[in-house]
Image: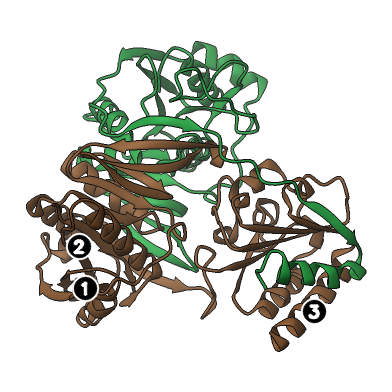
Chain colours: A brown, B green
Amino acid sequence: MANLFAFAETRGGELRKVALEAVTVARQLADASGGGEVHAMIAGASGVSRHAAALGAHGADLVLVVEHAGLAQYNPEAVAATVAERVKAGGYRAAVFSASAQGIDLAPRVAAKLGVGLASDVVAAEVRGDAVVVRHPVNTGKVIATVTVPSTPALLSLRPGAIAPVQAAKAGRAESVAPAADPAASRVVVKEVRQGSAGKLDLAEAPVIVSGGRGLKAKENFKLVEELADAFGNAAVGATRAVTDDGWRPHSDQIGQTGRVVSPNLYVAVGISGAIQHLAGMRTSKTIVAINKDKDAPIFKVADYGIVGDVFEVVPALTAAVREAKRHG
Amino acid sequence: MKIAVCIKRVPDMEARFRIAADGVSVDEAGLKFAMSDFDEWAVEAALQLKEKQGSGEVVVVSLGPDSVQETIRKALAMGADRGVQLKADRIPFDGLAIARALAAELQGGGYDLIFFGKVAVDSSNGVTGPMVAELLGLPCVTAVAKLDVANGRGTAERALEGAVEVLEFPLPAVLTVDQGLVAQARYPALKGIMAAKKKPLEVKPAQLGEARVAVTKMELPPERAAGRIIGEGAGAVPELVRLLQQEAKVL
């Protein structure tokens, strides 16, 4: 029997969905290795302890609350030091992080501090004997690696959105933990977090993604993509590298080999030719729809359903039809 | 300003990959190789900083067998001043093993900045940079998309999901480079390629750490079932909606 550690990510004091993913995986690994406890650590300014209930609802027996004014923003050095100290002292079988923007910063620091293995960007995890065994897409998702982490603790970071949070009611009793390093002494300081459009659904969390490429011809025409996303109601907007390089959309919206990798239930590619670069970022989507005026565009090879046509005619028609379907459904 | 850039030789990602006979690696026969995309941007960022400062040195370091010398020469052709190959039979999968070797080389080098690409496009781990920073006890900012350096301090921006994080840090520091930090990596001109042949490229044995994670299998993902073009123009929309509702059940 072994205990598992999970890091519960917050931003501006709010719990992020990836926190629940980490707790869920920790819970599943604990249950698979004799039913140990899950300890979830959460760090932030005063009041962040209120999330203990949500963490408990997803399987955390114990919630380690690190509350300090200096942790109102992510504080890489103080958080890494605190996590490492607790993971070392706690004798955990494994420690689960997200491979989110914050997680890719935090997890490797902790692994190096502890001198242990970190399997990152994991899409599936299980216990096999003494080791934690995970699956990790490599070579832009063209190959899947099975990676074994025999060390104790084994560190994993989860690809955001790859493993859905599962409710598993546990006590979620809160325990206060002091930061292991003075947050004010950190050399790297987050000065500000500039939020994008309020309420925008993140690409890793959206069940539907509507994505636009060069076929839209001009920055202003992305409005078509936004309106279609709006019609779905639960959609995020993505973009290709071509249009983010041209400044039509922010780089953080880019889906592709060097951008975000997504796996929504539905991916609608509007005016996207389907370059390898882009496919690398979305080819694991459950259903792919492509709209392009070129019937030979490579995107049609991966699309489940394709419409050959002018995006300026097809997309507004689809938007209206989706709104109608949603009204009746 | 003295800047080090750690670069990795990776297969060209346009290839159709096959699994090697050992079942734990990709068959390299017929593959083309290049510098990992993010590492090219890191080299470019270092060169731009050096040019902006007016003086300095850019050193590129790469771990692996002699074939990585080609990748180092590419960086030298872009304008880096000298290269170091940390020689190893193969490039380990585990970032910590690589990080130990890099840290041993970089320690005491007096670098103001050490650049990495955010993630290598083959192994896709994205851990080596921050691990090296930790081993060297240096401040680190990952996934830098915007950077200003002046008077021994830096300001960086990094992309969060739907937001931008602004950070400040002192030099010396380790930075990992994300898409968008530079517009694009420069193509080496013929003059640069010729000059690169004469620039120093030192070969030393890599002091690899023990690997703490291991690849026990590599396999190709299942092929997607073939899709179909269901029609042309706006007229195909009703059928698409029907299929999304009834067949795909996503609407």
Question: Is residue A21 visible in the rendered structure shown here?
Answer: yes
Which residue is depicted at the point 74% across and 54% down?
Answer: A304
**Mark 3 lies on residue:** A321
Query: How would you rate the neighbour count of disc 1 (Cα within 10 Å): few for under 14, some for 14-19, many for 20 or more?
Result: some
**Mark 1 lies on residue:** A170
Amino acid at dot 3: Ala
Please tell me in which quadrant of the rendered image residue B154 appears. Answer: bottom left
Residue at the left extreme of this rendering? A89
Please tell me in which quadrant of the rendered image residue B251 appears. Answer: bottom right
Residue at the bottom extreme of this rendering? A327
Residue B249 x %, y %: 66, 68
Q: CA separation, marks 1 and 3?
A: 44 Å
Residue A58 x %, y %: 30, 71
Upstream in sequence: badge 1 or badge 2: 2
Q: Secondary structure at mark 1?
A: loop
Question: Marks 1 and 3: CB-CB under 8 Å?
Answer: no
**Mark 2 lies on residue:** A38
Compared with A4, A49 (above or below) is below
Residue A61 x %, y %: 17, 69
